[in-house]
Amino acid sequence: MADNDCRENIITAAIPLFAAKGLNGVSVRELAGAADVNLSMISYYFGGKEGLYSAVLTEQFAVLGKLEEIEQMEIDTLQKFELYVRATVSRYRKNPYLLRFYTSELTNPTACFETIVKPAIKKVVQMLLDTFTNGLSHEKFRDNLDPADTVIALAGMINFYFLLEPATAELVDHSPDRDEKLIRHIMDIFTRGVLK
Amino acid sequence: MADNDCRENIITAAIPLFAAKGLNGVSVRELAGAADVNLSMISYYFGGKEGLYSAVLTEQFAVLGKLEEIEQMEIDTLQKFELYVRATVSRYRKNPYLLRFYTSELTNPTACFETIVKPAIKKVVQMLLDTFTNGLSHEKFRDNLDPADTVIALAGMINFYFLLEPATAELVDHSPDRDEKLIRHIMDIFTRGVLK
DNA sequence: TATTTTAAATCAAACGTTTGAACAACAGTT
DNA sequence: AACTGTTGTTCAAACGTTTGATTTAAAATA
């Protein structure tokens, strides 16, 4: 196998398996079989199954870093929130496994939660909080709003939509065709809900 | 050990363990040890670990059935939605483990997902959808609203607040003292967002 | 007596990890 | 060009441990 194909193969094959079954739900044999490599390669490249899981999570959560750019943009506060919602939707569409790791670590945390997941989530929430506070000082929003409750409400509306998909697929159309309508719908409720 | 104390002890001890680590994260020996009973009691009463997990999930999700009563009440549509939010908050406060099973099954589904979790969630969403549709016909809400997107947005605001707690506890005050304020906050955003 | 609970032992299967040999590519030496 | 040692990679096999489940016989309880 050429160069570091093997290492890449392992990570690529591990993503959907870890996402679907969690760290404890997959065996090294299953991982190695899916990547079509010898099972000792996992210890060789990652120091063990947990090391591989950590590498996968690091790669998955790296994309959240881009959200921090939103706060620095020279646009309206509400446009920043819309940009956050749009980025969230396109992120989940591009990577269908990210939300699984997200909620799996929130619900059944491994050692990676404190080192990788929690810091990443805190950064996003902090960015949204700062954006909101800035909007408050510009007198855009009603001043009896709680910053944390407000931004978590916004994040909840869009994230919960994707989280619920496995259970409500027969009840609600979750196709990407509706994404644009969904985004405008959420921003519509949010805007009317928080503006003066 | 008297009567069915043993059976009850096993379930009671299993709830926090399964909630924290998932089905695959706990061994029968750990479960029996936590319940302070012999390990053979799990096979005796539940036919094995998965049977115990199924029994725990059935018990946990039984409380969701009470939500269906809301739709039949002779109250305003918005009051029904507020009742749903209030019931959700008090449910999570009374049982801190329910949300873990909820999201754990949504993210890393076991055999119980199709039989227990999915039907329970669908019933709640269907109840909210019916409530909303009824409100639409009474011309309470803006008529360009999508029913599914609207009720999932409401559910997302309150559920995501609790889901995010492990990651944002240092950033946001999640104490029950704030629950009343949180409920009014969410209903405030939602009401302004959907009313004509 | 019948049911429930215990402790201990046993089972096959699966687990994550380690091993030592084999292999290829390459550099330095002769 | 031929040999040698090094380095990084891959492999099959085996390691010791733990897993979930079952069984046994004795004890406790009703």
Image: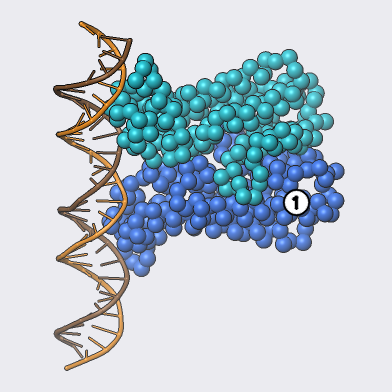
Chain colours: A blue, B cyan, C orange, D brown
- Does residue A6 appear in the picture of this structure? no
The one nearer the camera, A180 or C16, is C16
Chain designation of label 1: A
Instruction: Work out whether B19 lies above or below A118.
Output: above
The 10 Å Cα crowd at callout 1, few under 14, some 14 to 19, many 20 or more, is many
* Residue A160, percent from left and from top: 60, 39
Q: Is residue A177 above or below residue B4?
A: below
Q: Is residue B80 above or below residue C27?
A: above
Q: Name the residue beneath numbered marker 1.
A: A132
Location of the C terminus of chain A (image quadrant): top right
Residue C14 is drawn in which quadrant? top left
Q: Residue at x 74, y 23 (%)?
A: B79
Give the residue displayed 30% in from the left and 56% down from the top. A37
Location of residue A154 with respect to A127 vertically, above or below: above
Q: Position of residue A146 (x, y in %)?
A: 75, 44
Who is closer to the viewer here, A27 or A108?
Answer: A108
Q: Is residue A41 left or right of residue A80?
A: left
Q: Position of residue A120 (x, y in %)?
A: 57, 55
Residue B85 is situated, as x and y percent measured from the top left of the image, at 67, 29
Q: Secondary structure at mark 1?
A: helix
Where's the N terminus of chain A, which quadrant?
bottom left
Q: Which amino acid lies under the numbered mark 1 shown in the image of this protein? A: Phe
